[in-house]
Image (cartoon, rainbow, N blue to C red):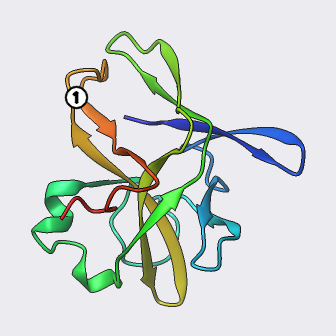
Amino acid sequence: MCGGVTFQQEQETIRTFFPNPKSCLPVRSKRGQVVLVPWGRREKQPGFTPLGGWARLESIHMGKWNNYNPKPVKIMVDGFMEKDQQGNSHWYALGEGEFIQGLLTEDAGVTRVYVVTITDPQSQHKSARWPRVLKHQENSLGE
């Protein structure tokens, strides 16, 4: 389900995990710069965006995110971690030119990013959710 990511920032390898309330994800801006954006929303954090750090692709297509000014973005990471049904962590590397689909939201002046997920048999997580991994030339929402 993508509970953690690893990425490069200023010659340093960063590992961040969703449970950390200060966790941010590297998002490519329209100008091509990579900026760190808060990852999802937790119970004690302000705002009205959904709790959690993930957005199901089906829910985006059904319009459930429309109140949050959603925009598709590229999350620029080297790899991600998911836990299997026994709670063991597994890391997965992204290939050359790949990124994780993200959904940028705005709520009460706060910008957040959610990892877009799909149902996928390669997921070992009890939810069977997997981050939507795309290549740079693909249309970001698959439309």
Residue count near mark 1 (Cα–Cα under 10 Å), binned few <14, some 14–19, many ≥20: some
Q: Is residue 56 above or below residue 69?
A: above
Q: In the displayed structure, does residue 15 sit left or right of residue 72?
A: right
Q: Residue at x 22, y 58 (%)?
A: 142
Q: Residue furthest bottom?
A: 109
Q: Residue furthest right?
A: 11
Q: Is residue 133 above or below residue 89?
A: below
Q: Where is residue 83 shown, x and y percent of the image?
A: 43, 21
Which amino acid type corresponds to the residue marked 1 in the rendered image?
Answer: Ala
Q: In the displayed structure, does residue 72 sit left or right of residue 4?
A: left
Q: Where is residue 44 shown, x and y percent of the image?
A: 51, 64
Q: Secondary structure at mark 1?
A: loop
Q: In the displayed structure, does residue 40 sit left or right of residue 128?
A: right
> Within the image, what quadrant is residue 93 found in?
top right
Q: Where is residue 111 shown, x and y percent of the image?
A: 53, 78
Q: Residue at x 45, y 82 (%)?
A: 106
Q: Residue at x 22, y 55 (%)?
A: 57
Q: Nearer the viewer, residue 113 or 9?
A: 9
> Is residue 31 something that shows in the picture?
yes
Q: Nearer the viewer, residue 34 or 117?
A: 34
Q: Where is residue 70 shown, x and y percent of the image?
A: 34, 77
Q: Nearer the viewer, residue 12 or 22?
A: 12
Q: In the displayed structure, does residue 125 sit left or right of residue 4?
A: left
> Is residue 41 something that shows in the picture?
no
Q: Residue at x 62, y 37 (%)?
A: 78
Quadrant that contains the C terminus: bottom left
> Within the image, what quadrant is residue 51 found in?
bottom left
Total number of numbered discs in the rendering: 1
Write down the residue under mark 1.
Answer: 128
Quadrant that contains the N terminus: top left
> Within the image, what quadrant is residue 18 found in?
top right
Q: Residue furthest front?
A: 137
